[in-house]
Amino acid sequence: MPESNVARPSEKGHSLLWLMFEAKMLGRFLVTLLGLLFAAWIAVIMNVHNLAIHIDRGMDHLESLRKNSLDIISLTQKQDKAASRESAR
């Protein structure tokens, strides 16, 4: 008897259950993948945010160093002027 491409009723039920199982597993996989992508995106955003905070703090630190060095230069110039006045007397 030639083989037919029509599945028997028992095979149809089995293949339908198998397709439902595969669809469920595919759905779980896609949800997991979506969750991992979301978590990675949040991690990237947080790292960029933390980097921006560190850059801002670094700029504040550099500004503070600049002000301190200007204060030291100004104080040194005042001391030099006072010393030159003292030596001129």
Image: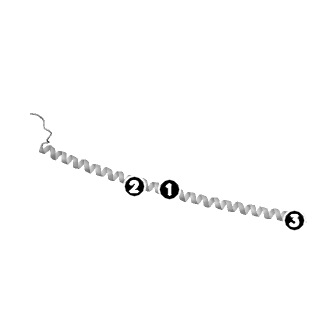
Would residue 32 appear left or right of 44 to someone viewing this image? left
- Amino acid type of the residue that numbered disc 3 sits on in the rendered structure: Glu
Disc 3 versus disc 1: nearer the observer: 1
Which residue ends up furthest to the left in the rendered image? 1
Q: Residue at x 25, y 47 (%)?
A: 22
Task: Give the image quarter of residue 42.
Answer: bottom left
Give the amino acid type for the residue marked by disc 1 in the picture: Val
Q: Secondary structure at mark 3?
A: helix
Residue at mark 2 to residue at mark 1: CA–CA distance:
15 Å
Pinpoint residue 9: horizontal percent, then vertical percent: 12, 45
Of circles 2 and 3, the one toward us is 2
Which mark sits nearer the N-terminus, 2 or 1?
2
Q: Is residue 89 left or right of residue 1?
A: right
Q: Disc 2 vs disc 3: Cβ atoms closer than 8 Å?
A: no
Callout 2–callout 1 Cβ contact below 8 Å: no
User: Which dot marks residue 21?
Assistant: none
User: Along the polypeptide, which appears first: circle 3 or circle 1?
Assistant: 1
Is disc 2 placed on a helix, strand or loop? helix
Separation of disc 3 and disc 1 at Cα?
57 Å
Q: Tell how many labels.
A: 3
The image shows residue 16 at horizontal and vertical percentages of: 19, 47
Give the crowd class for mark 1: few <14, some 14-19, many >=20 residues within 10 Å. few
Q: Secondary structure at mark 1?
A: helix
Residue shown at 38% from the left, 52% from the top: 36
- Cα gap from disc 2 to disc 3, whole angstroms: 72 Å
Which residue position holds label 2? 38
Q: Position of residue 17 (x, y in %)?
A: 19, 48
Residue, disc 1: 48
User: Mark 3 highlights which residue?
Assistant: 86
Residue 5 rendering spot, x and y as whole percentages: 15, 39
Mark 2 or mark 3, earlier in chain: 2
Q: Residue at x 67, y 59 (%)?
A: 65
